[in-house]
Image: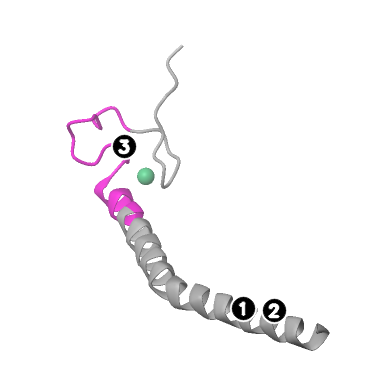
Amino acid sequence: MIKPLTCPVCHKVLPPQVSQDSGVFPFCSARCKSVDLFRWTDGKYAIVEDLAQRPDLLQQIMEDELLASDQEREESY
Ligand SMILES: [Zn+2]
């Protein structure tokens, strides 16, 4: 049994004229293809922003923790 291909955006069964060479595959139409592209672009921007902020945040957290543990050690002696 062949499972009908569905558009990952609107979840409609792909019309028969949509094939892997049609340019919009695996989407049912150019509209759904651009909707998916927009989703990916949004996601990419969010990830890039995250990564760009992460090193500073990580370093800050690590420095804070080092300072805190140093202070605790000094106080306990
Ligand atoms: Zn669609």
Residue identified by numbered label 1: 66
Which residue bears the numbered disc 3? Answer: 26
Location of residue 62 with respect to 31 vertically, above or below? below
Callout 1 secondary element: helix
Image: magenta residue range: 15-36
Q: Which quadrant: the C terminus?
A: bottom right
Amino acid carrying label 3: it is Pro
In the visual, does 59 lie left or right of 69? left
What residue is rendered at 25% in x and 48% in y? 30
- Residue designated by label 2: 69
Mark nearest the camera among 3 and 1 is 1
On screen, residue 29 above or below 55: above
**Mark 3 and mark 1: Cα distance apart in space:** 51 Å
Magenta stretch holds residue 12 = no
- x and y percentages locating residue 32 in the rendered image: 33, 50
Local packing at callout 2 (Cα closer than 10 Å; few below 14, some 14-19, many 20+) is few
**Which mark sits nearer the N-terminus, 2 or 3?**
3
Of residues 37 and 31, the one nearer the viewer is 37
Quadrant of the displayed image that contains ligand 1? top left
